[in-house]
Amino acid sequence: MSDKNPISSTDLLMIANQIIQDQESYIDGMRATSVEERDGVLIFKGEYFLDDEGLPTPNTTVVFNMFKMLAHKLSPEFTLES
């Protein structure tokens, strides 16, 4: 039996986006727009601040690291409701 709390994706995104906004590395417009779960790991997605040619910018790394932090922080606590 899992000791993770079941949560809707909508509620989880609200929690994740509050965490994002509270971080020192927050960039205006940074937010998670979707979440899925694979093998017990929550995967957050959103705007990656790519340039006009679709290539990464310095902000892309910041966003990637933010989503990675969310996965590490929230995956042990929550599981998406079926």
Image (tube, rainbow, N blue to C red):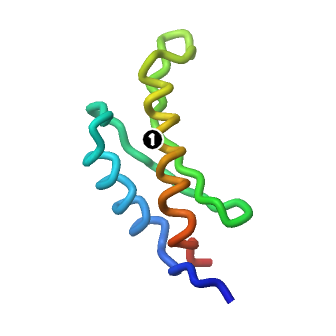
| Residue 52 position in % (x across, y down) | 48, 11
User: Looking at the rendering, which quadrant does residue 55 occupy?
Assistant: top right
In the rendered image of this protein, does residue 32 appear above or below residue 60? Answer: below
| Residue 9 position in % (x across, y down) | 48, 66
Quadrant housing the C terminus? bottom right
Quadrant housing the N terminus? bottom right
Q: Residue furthest top?
A: 53
Residue shown at 56% from the left, 79% from the top: 4
Q: Residue furthest right?
A: 39
In the rendered image of this protein, does residue 14 appear above or below residue 31? Answer: below
Relative to 1, is 21 on the left or the right? left
Residue shown at 74% from the left, 63% from the top: 39
**Residue placed most toward the observer, 80 or 5:** 5
Q: Residue furthest bottom?
A: 1
Q: Few, some or many C-alpha atoms within 10 Å of disc 1 (few <14, some 14-19, many ≥20)?
A: many
**How many numbered markers are drawn?**
1
Q: Amino acid at mark 1?
A: Met
Relative to 3, is 10 on the left or the right? left
User: Looking at the rendering, which quadrant does residue 59 occupy?
Assistant: top left
Asked which secondary structure carries label 1, the reply is helix
User: Looking at the rendering, which quadrant does residue 14 occupy?
Assistant: bottom left
Residue shown at 54% from the left, 44% from the top: 68
Judging by the rendered image, the residue that carries numbered circle 1 is: 66
| Residue 3 position in % (x across, y down) | 58, 84
| Residue 72 position in % (x across, y down) | 54, 55
Relative to 76, is 32 on the left or the right? left
Residue shown at 39% from the left, 56% from the top: 16
In the rendered image of this protein, does residue 2 appear above or below residue 23? Answer: below
